[in-house]
Image: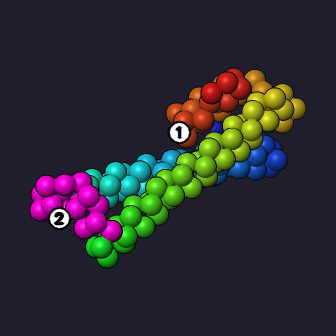
Amino acid sequence: MIFPIELDEVTKAILKRVMTHKKEWNDMKKRMHLSFILFLLSLALFGLYIYQTFVISHRTSIERIMMALMNDERTFSFVVFVGSLAWLVLFYKKKSEKAEQDFHALRCEFIQKSSELLQERAWEKRHVLYEWMKKTYDISLYHENK
């Protein structure tokens, strides 16, 4: 990896870790969004299946609809599948939040210690590095707030 200014190895290693954590966080967000879309799609298909199979044919009473639902083997499979996708969404949501916390903690640590990490010449040109990180990786190193 080529940085826009001259940096020592420790600073390069820390910045690479910050970039890695940002990538992991973005990957977890994508997985969470994809699993949420799959969950909504499967929920809609399950609702359509229930409506087409049970509600239309047994519309005379709710009791008949419920009995038909309980006697159908596919209903349990659908419920397990949709429930598994709901669990997957929650799993990736927690992983995404953890990755976000790790990324922000590491980013804030770099910001706090940047005056020690960046040597005199690099400190004078830090704005070039910060702009490059913001533009290339969407990582702000100016302030600790998001």
Residue matched to label 1: 136
Side of 83 relative to 73 (left or right): right
> Toward the viewer: 51 or 107?
51
Residue positioned 61% across, 52% down in the render: 95
Which of the image's four quarters has the C terminus? top right
The quadrant holding residue 49 is bottom left
Q: Residues within 10 Å of mark 2 (few under 14, many from 20)?
A: some
> What's the residue type where badge 2 is placed?
Thr
Q: Is residue 2 magenta?
A: no
Residue positioned 26% across, 58% down in the render: 63
Residue matched to label 2: 53
Q: Which residues are magenta?
A: 54-70
Q: Is residue 60 magenta?
A: yes
How far from the left and from the top, in percent, is residue 129? 65, 33
Q: In the displayed structure, would residue 76 be above or below residue 45?
A: below
Does dot 1 land on a helix, a strand or a loop? Answer: helix
Does dot 2 land on a helix, a strand or a loop? Answer: helix
> What's the residue type where badge 1 is placed?
Thr
Q: Main secondary structure of the magenta part?
A: helix
The disc, 1 or 2, on the residue closer to the chain's N-terminal end is: 2
How far from the left and from the top, in percent, is residue 119? 84, 33
> Toward the viewer: 81 or 120?
81
- Point out the frontmost of discs 1 and 2: 2
